[in-house]
Image (cartoon, grey):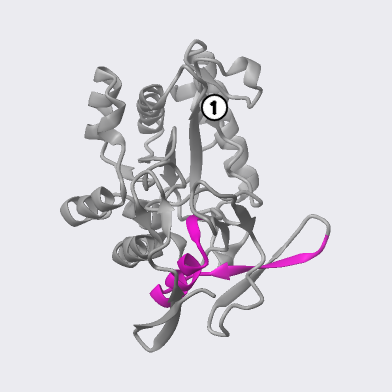
Amino acid sequence: MASSHPLQIGHRTVRVSNLDKVFYPASGFTKGEVIDYYIRIAPVLLKQIKDRALTLKRYPDGVEGGFFYEKQCPSHAPEWIRTTPVKKSDGSTIRYCLLNDLPSLVWAVNLANLEFHPFLHRTRARTRPTMLMFDLDPGPPADIVDCARVALRLRGLFAALELECCVKTSGSKGMQLAVPLNTPVTYRRTKAFAHAVARTMAARFPGQIVPEMKKSLREGKVLIDWSQNDDAKTTVCAYSLRAREAPTVSTPLRWEEVEPVAESGDAGAIRFTAEQAIARVEGLGDLWAPVASLKQALPRITEISRRA
């Protein structure tokens, strides 16, 4: 039977268990250390997931064991865990968890949830994405260095469109780029705009970029996955751990860090583990903060080809 311990967080008591269980065998990183990481990173992480329905990705036996995605908030959740209804295409409803505070976050992590995948909209405005999101996925032998080069090209396009953008590692093999909006817009517009961006960039750099999922087209190129801009899709959030060999983190970057990687080819310079991610927040602040707060209007699609 699992050993369980009460953890007092504010006015809530959260029971945590199996703290010594190793979740990342290659480094010996335990479940207790996973919980500790999320408690320490919570001040910035919670800004990204507040009022967003979340898909949980649970690893009961650690990263080398099996995993499962959980959309429906578990029936055994404490009564103080908030949920939000999301309608499926077949008309049924799923009640997703909302993790708006530290006790809720710790409760979810104690379920062996290592990764957090929120929607691009908040629950109070379910048809309004707050950002454009691009997943940069390298097709071997392309790698994260190639993603860095593509990210810089995208930044150039968005600068021409007078839009600021933020970049982060995926914590896995690629990168993600977000364009904060936080203004009235629909998924229909953002998805069409993102698709046009991907097509335009692929036409300009056909040897480097591909805009479609088809694997036969992706070898040695970077997929600009524009399809994330959909009301049914979720994306791993900034500061989430990833279930890799080491406890790597989806880490926001400064553009001044991306440029030398693109030039030198040193992929290790932008690979960060849990402790390093915390140290970066302590030293650099929350580099992903503009994604939650910066207000920018989405240009017309015709502006993409005109300014590219």
| Near-viewer residue (40 or 135) | 40
Q: Is residue 190 left or right of residue 17?
A: right
Residue 191 sits in quarter: top right
> Would residue 158 be counted in the magenta stretch?
no
Above/below status of 171 relative to 218? below
Q: Identify the residue shown where x is 39% and y is 68%.
A: 19
| Near-viewer residue (201 or 216) | 216
Q: Is residue 68 left or right of residue 32?
A: right
Residues in magenta, as a range: 91-116
Above/below status of 180 relative to 108? above
Above/below status of 39 relative to 236? below
Residue 74 locus on image (x, y percent): 64, 71
The residue at which mark 1 appears reads as 198
Q: Look at the image and tell me in which quarter the N terminus lies.
A: bottom right
Q: Is residue 124 left or right of residue 265?
A: right
Q: Identify the residue shown where x is 50% and y is 36%.
A: 135
